[in-house]
Amino acid sequence: MKQKQNSAYTAPALEKGLDILELLSERDTGLTQSEIARALGRSVGEIFRMLMVLQDRGYVSQDPLSDRYSLTTFIFEVAHRIPIVGRMTAIAGPAMRELSGKINQSAHLAILSEGAVLVVGQTTSPGNNVLSVRLGARIDLWRASSGRVILAFQPEKEVKRLMKDVPVPPGTSASQILDELSAIRAAGIEVRDSFVVKGVVNISAPIIDHSGLAIGALTVPHIERFDETITFEKCKAEVIVTAVRLSKSLGGQLPEIN
């Protein structure tokens, strides 16, 4: 859960509800009422009232067999009502499915959210061997090609602000990150080994809006198959074509790709 910051304003009931939502978002199998109370340091009575309201509003559901509470997809639907996210994902969905069909690779669409990378769109390869990133996943800002590509097309002052909020990884300096972002901006795309999976090469291109800034990134975590007939260069070219298409639909223009 996000660390609470000191504030001149408090709303205890609202904070309890948000604490529950954030806690459940981290637990794949859900939690019982007593487990939620224990994790949050609250009484069972407090948690019961909050859970009843959240359940009535459709944000959580209770498994009748295990009595565990889990988040529903409603919270994801609410997030997609944000105009820019909703518009981008609506446009990107068909384009990404077409892309995955052409290159036999999975693809995902990501945005920046609260100092992290949030996956808001995802398509899987039509083949038997699939590597994909979970829809709704939050990824370390500095260890994701999507985040780096988006930041490469942001004002430097915004990048430096994020560096204060989200420290760069150990062994990496701020100047090194800035140099790498500059190189990505010059190339117009990032092609690099995955930060987390050996043998995977990320192909990531920015989605540019009318302001000339990146509002998202389209990324293909490319896997190489022994019997693959589609070349890596073909995959890269198709990612660029799709990113250009999405940018134009939002009134933006991708820079020239080197």
Image: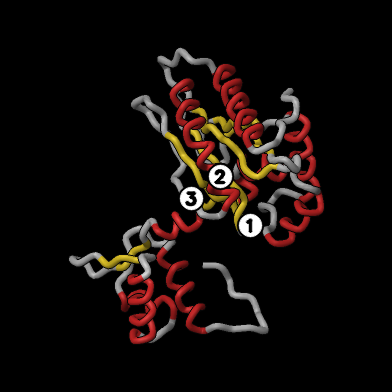
- List x then y, in percent, for residue 194: 56, 36
User: Would you identify the image quadrant in which residue 195 lies?
Assistant: top right
Drawn side of residue 68 relative to residue 234, left or right: left
Q: Tell us which disc is closer to us: 1 or 2.
A: 2
Depth order, front residue of 101/199:
101
Secondary element at tag 1: loop
Q: Which badge, 1 or 2, is on the more N-terminal residue?
A: 2
- The answer for how far apart the CA atoms under marks 1 and 2 are is 22 Å
Please give the residue where the numbered disc 3 appears in the rendered image. 137
- List x then y, in percent, for residue 92: 53, 36
Mark 2 nearby-residue class (10 Å; few <14, some 14–19, many ≥20)? some
**Which residue occupies 46% across, 39% down?**
122
- The answer for how far apart the CA atoms under marks 2 and 3 are is 20 Å
- Against 66, residue 44 (above or below) is below
Give the numbered dot on residue 115: 1
Q: Tell us which disc is closer to us: 2 or 3.
A: 2
**Which residue occupies 56% across, 55% down?**
82
Mark 3 nearby-residue class (10 Å; few <14, some 14–19, many ≥20)? few
**Which residue occupies 37% across, 76% down?**
53
Depth order, front residue of 57/227:
57
Secondary element at tag 2: helix
Amino acid under disc 3: Ala
Amino acid under disc 2: Arg
Please give the residue where the numbered disc 2 appears in the rendered image. 87
User: Would you identify the image quadrant in which residue 145 lies?
Assistant: top right
Amino acid under disc 1: Gly
- Against 68, residue 98 (above or below) is above
Q: Are marks 2 and 3 in contact (CB under 8 Å)?
A: no
Mark 1 nearby-residue class (10 Å; few <14, some 14–19, many ≥20)? some
